[in-house]
Image (cartoon, rainbow, N blue to C red):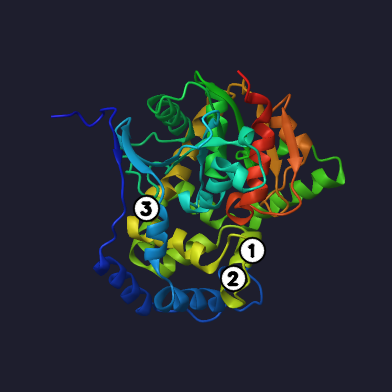
Amino acid sequence: MKMPNDNEIRPFRLDTPEDTIADLRRRIAATRWPTRELVTDRSQGVQLATIQELARYWMTDYDWRTCETKLNSLPQYTTNIDGVEIHFIHVRSQHESALPLIMTHGWPGSVVELLGAVGPLTDPTAHGGTPEDAFHLVLPSLPGYGFSGEPTEPGWNSARMAQAWAKLMDRLGYARYVAQGGDVGAAVTDAMGRQAPDGLLGIHVNLIAGAIGIKDKLPAKTEQERAALDALNLFAKDGFGYFLEQSTRPQTIGYSLLDSPVGLAAWMLDHDTDSYYKISRAFLDNESAGGLTRDSILDNITLYWLTGTGASSARWYWEQGRFQAAAQAAGQAPPPVTVPVGFTTFPGEIWPAPRSWAEAVYPGIAYFNEADRGGHFAAWEEPELFSAEVRAAFQPLRTP
């Protein structure tokens, strides 16, 4: 009998029971609705017209099987790392000289938000690039998210996830690789850069994940810096609801997230102003912001529903908050990042970081660029532009 911590990599295929999908539709139809908000913007939360149209489309027009087929067309696997079953997509490029890249999603995202970048990154010659731009791509589902297993003990903060990713890349036989992430994925990728495991050549992130905790130390002299600080303060004052709940009481909100599909959808939509209005327009006006289409938005929400990961995914915020508070109380500064760092700031990000902020967190930053479009879900919204940024950031690291 094999021990649960074996190194075996097992193929994974998704096959959702039809009665599970029927139950989802039944629950949507049985939703009890609040009255309409008393304002004309999102300041009271997700607007009734938006969520009702999402629910209507979800119940009558949306087809999960399309997403299931898309996922099953990609090579998917699971392996046990540190007692948790980790799901990941692993697409090797046809170009053997490709650079291995592990890319990490965030919350309220999943591997779904990264699917648009798979082609441009692994097959660049079909997307305006050259064979020298190719990556072998590893897309893991975070522990407690999607098709990965749930941690059964506390302690799964970003640092522990980063260690798991290093084990995963080693298990896949990659002696040299790079890492990328946004949102929670940015925190995990940042931790990888600070741990500097053998073989990690460099990292690229598109969010300063811990900016709230160091906002008083970030430059605020120029107009751009002050605008970034204003955005950060606004988020901390007026957009922080989900963050505060998940970092203090993830179990409490979890009951609603696993019992009500519409409750789950509303909670996931209420993340940041830019993406909220883009998603709202997708449903009310059928106006997509790049890859943020009605169907792909529901692919991501449905994945959370079918896997029942509303509570377990929220627990990362609790884990990370306590980890950071303990380190701060002990006077422990995080170790420096010792590998090259690339950073791209997208204009619709919650707080679009100027170069000075990136340099404050990553002294000697190797690559920095301000994109002209895209937001918090950059890989989802603008997969071609995002992929070009990843290529540019890691290009100098390709030669041994």
Tell me where residue 88 sits by quadrant: top left
The type of residue carrying mark 1 is Ala
Query: Dot 3: within a 10 Å radius of its alpha carbon, few (fewer than 14), some, or many (20 or more) residues?
Result: some
The residue that label 2 is drawn on is: 282
Quick check: can you spot residue 85?
A: no
Provide the secondary structure element on which disc 3 rests. Answer: helix
Tell me where residue 150 sits by quadrant: top left
Q: Front-most of 213 and 377?
A: 377
The type of residue carrying mark 2 is Ala
Query: Dot 1: within a 10 Å radius of its alpha carbon, few (fewer than 14), some, or many (20 or more) residues?
Result: some
The residue that label 1 is drawn on is: 289
Residue 144 lies left or right of residue 139; in this view the side is left
At horizontal 40% and vertical 52% (from top left) the residue drawn is 73
Quadrant occupied by the C terminus = top right
Q: Name the N-terminal-most of marks 2 and 1.
A: 2
Circles 2 and 1: CB atoms closer than 8 Å? yes
Nearest to viewer (mark 3 / mark 2): 3
| Disc assigned to residue 72 | 3
The image position of residue 343, as x and y in percent, is 68, 37
Q: Front-most of 255 and 126?
A: 126
Tell me where residue 78 sits by quadrant: top left
The image position of residue 91, as x and y in percent, is 45, 40
Report, in whole angstroms, how far the alpha carbon at label 3 lies from the one at label 2: 26 Å
Q: Front-most of 363 and 202?
A: 202
Nearest to viewer (mark 3 / mark 1): 3
At horizontal 60% and vertical 31% (from top left) the residue drawn is 203
Report, in whole angstroms, how far the alpha carbon at label 3 lies from the one at label 1: 25 Å
